[in-house]
Image: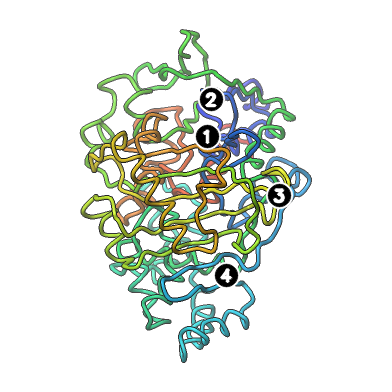
Amino acid sequence: MDKKAGKKIVIVGAGPGGLTAAMVLAKRGFQVDVFEKAPVVGGRNAELQVGNFRFDLGPTFLMMKFVLDKAFEQAGVKSEDYLDFRRLDPMYRLIFPEFSLDVTEQREQMKQEIARYFPGEDAGLDKFFEREADRFRHIYNCLEKDYSSIADFFKPTFLRALPYIPFGRSIFQYLGNYFRSEKLRLSFTFQSKYLGMSPWECPGFFVILPYIEHEFGIFHVQGGLSEISKAMARVAEGHGARIYLNAEVKRLDVSRRKVKGVILADGTHIDADETVINADFAHAMQTLVPDGLLKKYASTKLKKKKYSCSTFMLYLGLDRAYPEMAHHSIVFANDYHKNTDDIFRTLRLSEDISFYIRNSSVTDDRVAPAGKSAIYILVPVPNNESGIDWEHEKARFREMVLDIIARRTAMGDLRPHIVAERVVTPADWEDAGIFYGATFNLAHTMNQMLYFRPHNQFEELDNCYLVGGGTHPGSGLPTIYQSGLIAANLIGRKYHGV
């Protein structure tokens, strides 16, 4: 008898982790119901439409495409049959005050770029690839495991990786093994911002991020990365999953620490054999779980955790094209170290900011009308532990961002060309259900990773699983997809499936 036959899985949230789990579990024969409070799928990976312009609400970098491919394969399909991928090269442009560096995955060309701006340091790139390839092979395997038990640290996978984990060193410090110049190190460590962390604080463990980019490339999906969530929903529904939009889950139905299902905002009770939570972790623990049940993750303890930064967002529809701008650009503050200290230590708004611009219209004609541009601007800022009054600061900060774009980029003054606009502040993120507005969730400190991060099979409630950036392996699209795969495999193993 197939023990999974008739077993019902409820998934709270149709973000990328929940959709990954949904399509894999539905393929394996489970009855899957997904409840999403928004009118569209995707969560922070949803599409945002402003007038005739299309934006990704959140993630815009697709790295580790092989993880996404694996998720689709486990759902019995090929990602290329659903999505139109474009490999980007150059991958992105780094704009420093003195010069701009186009970062390419072509190794010899990249060495020439390094030699041009950092004479004598190009040999460090060969050393970087030689050593980091070995590190990646060992560490990546750790990210595929579930770490539900402290005993997982004593299994061969982790023990083999242990010598390759640079404990006690930040990613910026560790890159000193290869490069002397601070700006060259920053060219290989700004990726810590993907985790909402400073390169001077982000664990050296994450040196695998720049290696992954240079070794495996960066991709765009035509129409935006939100198309991935739409495709996952189609695959899941094709296998029989049901996705309910505008269907907010009010709380979990819990009896003696066992999750029996969910209760919707309209009062409807939905029974489940297993429940998967795809929501901001700290917010979900304080709003979905009945009071007094949690100990390890009680509200008072959650507030003592370390969280990522937040982001100030500008989504601009412009009446002209900008072919001179790269698809991805990162603009560094004049004093990048001080800027990161303002964000992560003193929790102040910098006047000298760093920011990211996506100009996907140079690659994708589906995001804006012909001859126009959909420009996405992300500025890392302190999370809401800062107490910053965004109602008061919003307009001033917007003007400052536009002023600096005019000075520091080839785009000039954007104001005369804005025909559609949406602004999102950390206060808006928190209103949308993100604790402290920390858009990258729990910080990725060593004491909040692997076993020390909330477990995919949630340790405080039975029949409950976690996916998304607040659980293992962490934030960022590839690791969120991996969390969905881990949760699906844990449920599958419980019912003797695969």
Name which residue type carries label 3: Gly
Name which residue type carries label 2: Ala
Residue 131 as seen in the image, left or right of residue 310: right
Which mark sits nearer the N-terminus, 3 or 2? 2
Q: Secondary structure at mark 2?
A: loop
- Quadrant of the rendered structure where residue 29 is? top right
Callouts 3 and 4 close, C-beta under 8 Å: no
Q: Nearer the viewer, residue 274 or 266?
A: 266
Q: Nearer the viewer, residue 209 or 467?
A: 209
Which mark sits nearer the N-terminus, 1 or 2? 2
Q: Secondary structure at mark 3?
A: loop
Give the numbered dot on residue 371. Answer: 3
Give the numbered dot on residue 173. Answer: none
How far is disc 3 from disc 2 in space, using C-alphas?
A: 31 Å
Name which residue type carries label 1: Gly
Q: In the image, what residue occupies the spot 55% across and 19% down? A: 246
Residue 214 as seen in the image, left or right of residue 280: right
Q: In the image, what residue occupies the spot 36% across and 42% down? A: 438
Does residue 94 lie above or below 54 as drawn?
below
**What residue would you read off at disc 2?**
38
